[in-house]
Image (cartoon, grey):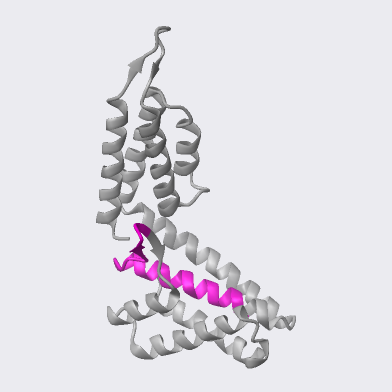
Amino acid sequence: MKTEKLVKRFDELLVVGSHVLGTRKSYKSGSEYVDSGLFYGFRTSSLSFIKTVFGTDHPYYQGFDEHTKYPDPNHTKQGIEILKSAKVEVEGGWLTTVRGILSAEIFSDFLEMSKYLLSEGYKDPAAVMIGSVLEEHLRQLCIKNGIPTEYEKDGELVPKKADRLNAELAASNIYNKLDQKNITAWLDLRNKVAHGKYKEYTKEQVELMLQAVTEFMARNSP
């Protein structure tokens, strides 16, 4: 998702939050409340978006979840402030920077684990792990280069499959046709594992896949 689209969605949610605040009323006891239907719609939409952008382990997600429990003005205001902070972070480019660093570290760990699995003779789980790292790397390359990683289907955003990401990256000249062809072959090997076709590839082929994917990722960092 491009930064502009992310910022636009933040703005849309902030408008919804303002509408929720506009429904504030008081009980006879003096305590205040807001329209519960609008509030929980605001809460659900915001959590879903924050999860997509930052993940459930991020403080923005956890903070929003914790501080927007009840349909009252204070919880609505806290949700709005969290969204504003998250928006500033995205506008400043910090999201891409942090994701790139974390991804590099995580990918390195998984590829090392794949290497260990191969050394122990476990070619099948190693192939799955390498393929998963490759797919996420393609997703990160798309994010870096402003290529959407989701498409709309029946009113919902659906993640694009790895083959489609590969085709769109090559079409945008992020890498060449030879890389695209190799990636297609690596993804095909991963799919053979997923369908239980374990005899259609060898340990040596998975070892070559690991070496080639590692080299490709080094040349095309997100």
Give the residue at x 61% y 81%.
195
Q: Residue at x 69, y 77 (%)?
A: 117
Residue 83 sits above or below residue 104 on the image: above
166 or 19, which is in the foreground? 19
Q: Looking at the magenta stretch, what is its main secondary structure?
A: helix
Give me the residue at 35% from left, 69% from top.
142
- Quarter of the N terminus within the rendering: bottom left
Q: Residue at x 45, y 84 (%)?
A: 183
Question: Is residue 146 magenta-colored?
Answer: yes
Q: Quadrant of residue 95?
A: bottom left
Q: Is residue 214 magenta?
A: no
Image: 221 above or below 212: above
Which quadrant of the figure has residue 152?
Answer: bottom left
Q: What percent of the width, then of the height, locates residue 56? A: 51, 48
Quadrant including the C terminus: bottom left
Left or right: residue 194 versus residue 89 is right
Left or right of 111? Residue 164 is left
Residue stretch rendered in magenta on the structure: 127-156
The picture places residue 73, in percent across and down from the top left corner, at 37, 23
- The furthest residue to the right: 120
Can see residue 201?
A: no
Question: Percent position (x, y) of residue 129?
Answer: 59, 74
- Where 43 falls versus 8 (above or below)? above
Where residue 103 appears, x then y in whole percent?
48, 63
